[in-house]
Image (tube, rainbow, N blue to C red):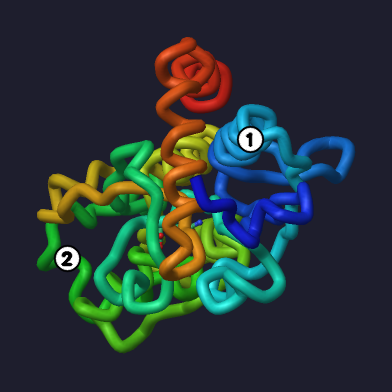
Amino acid sequence: AAESDALADGVLTVGTNAEFPPFEYVDDNGEADGFDMALCKAIGEKLGVEVKIENMEFASLVSSIGSKIDIAAAGMTVTDERKESVDFSNPYYEAVQYVIVSADSDIATADDLKDKTIGVQLGTTGDFIAEEYTSNVAQYNKAVDAVNDLVNGKVDVVIIDKNPALVFETKFEGKVKAIEGAQFGFETEEYAIALPKGDTALADAVNGAVDELKADGTFDELVKTYIEA
Ligand code: GLN
């Protein structure tokens, strides 16, 4: 099979935004860890290349593919707009946006979101949804800063993906609650690894490696360790 330029140097540089637990976060040693990071390291092992992680702003990931980074693994939702600039691997995880509010809030339906101040991570699908409800969108590079401002009363609502929402609900226990997106009519999303446009050799290699990791049980192990733990 043709070899991908991205793999030719023996190093696969993976971009992420390590502010999105449990998919990516900075661990106690200052290293990027999380489900996506472990998955990419396992992919690298299957492909016999070294994996290097570049931690950057989420909003810069797509435009950095092909220059600063080879691929991006960041709990990134497949969207038509992103597909104009990058290709995606086969989806590896189903997600949905959740709504985080203060523990005593009455916010419960999509109507309640209208004209609220909504905190989001810049450039995410939560950001795009928030803009449908209000012009008061507060955009953050770090999700935790949005939740801090919710606790401080600077924003009314945070819209973010389910699993990070559940992590923040635990982290800020008693102060905030995470509400299922289905209650607001939000549709399910799919995470995939973003790849350089047109590099079918790399797409085949990544998809093949993930298929092997699913077949040998590694993928399920990582889900148990990082997401369901
Ligand atoms: N899944 C969301 C998106 O792709 C959020 C990802 C993230 O914040 N890392 O926009």
Q: Is residue 172 visible?
A: no
Helix, strand or loop at disc 2? helix
Ligand 1 falls in quadrant: bottom left
Q: Count residues near mark 2 (Cα–Cα under 10 Å), then give few for <14, some for 14-19, many for 20+.
A: few
Mark 2 to mark 1 CA distance (whole Å):
48 Å
Q: Quarter of the image holding residue 114?
A: bottom left
At label 2, the amino acid type is Asp
Q: Which mark is residue 202?
A: none
Instruction: Report the residue marked by disc 2.
Output: 112
Q: Residue at x 64, y 61 (%)?
A: 5
Query: In the picture provided, is 104 more to the left or to the right than 121?
Result: left
Residue 125 percent coordinates (x, y):
34, 65
Query: Is 159 in front, or is 92?
Result: 92
Looking at the rendered structure, the secondary structure element under dot 1 is helix
Residue under the point 37% across and 63% down: 157
Mark 1 is surrounded, within 10 Å at the Cα level, by few (under 14), some (14 to 19) or many (20 or more) other residues, namely: some
The earlier-in-sequence mark between 2 and 1 is: 1
